[in-house]
Image (spheres, rainbow, N blue to C red):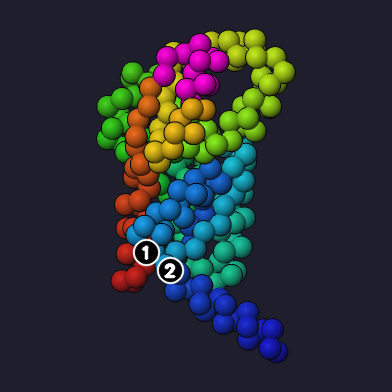
Amino acid sequence: MGSMNAMNAGQSHNADKVLVIACGMIAREVLAVKASHRLDHLDLICLPAELHYHPDRIPSAMDTAIADARRDGYTHIFAGYADCGTGGMLDKVLQKHGVERMAGPHCFAFYQGGAAFEQLADGDMMAFYMTDFLCRHFDAFFMKPLGLDRHPELARDYFGNYEKVVYLAQTENSELEKVAVAAAAMLGLAYEKRSTGYGDLAPALARTATRQAVS
């Protein structure tokens, strides 16, 4: 009986919170926005960052995560994803559950802000985007999986259709920028840095939290 009461109390507590179910690639950024905007009633769980490269798996993973969250008593849920290559399949899952997501096609868009991304889209057709996360985990997400740590000569085969590396910097971190600069040099591409901060992520989370607070 005691454990059941504790479970019910936890579910009741969660009903007063906003749960963000996010891509693991933006976990640090969500927590930074939470802290800077004092969104103390916002909770975060993350799906594996590796799903970024398997977008067909995102909808089912999100479906399961939302169902689990509902069982845990969360009534206010927000998806920390854009479409992210799911071709609208993620939206079908979210519509079923009545959950909103970040606007836009992917995180590279909402970091820049939707309007800015649209203005730059034509010039970025051949851009290879990097973010703070991808700089921080460049070896794990690119060098080792593609075998570039053993065969760097394959870089041109993998990235030969790109024209430039665009580093979308969420923070000003010289060590992360060194990774982006080195990546551009290794790939034989031009380099450009855009200091985006958290883009549309911050206002989207703030709006979500505010709507919950007044509901």
Between tags 2 and 1, which lies in front? 1
Q: Give the residue number, with chain letter if any, for mark 1.
A: 38
Q: Is residue 166 above or below residue 79?
A: above
Q: Quadrant of residue 169?
A: top left
Residue in the image at 53% along x and 34% along y:
134
**Which residue is painted at 62% across and 55% down in the image?**
64
Q: Position of residue 2 (x, y in %)?
A: 68, 88
Dividing the picture into quadrants, the one containing residue 4 is bottom right
Residue found at x 51% / y 68%: 74
The image quadrant where one finds the N terminus is bottom right
Judged from this view, the residue extending furthest toward the bottom is 1
Figure quadrant of the C terminus = bottom left
Callout count = 2
194 is higher (above) or lower (below) than 40: above
- The residue carrying mark 2 is 41
Three-letter residue code for mark 1: Arg
Q: Note whether residue 3 is visible.
A: yes
Judging from the image, what secondary structure is the residue with disc 2 in? loop
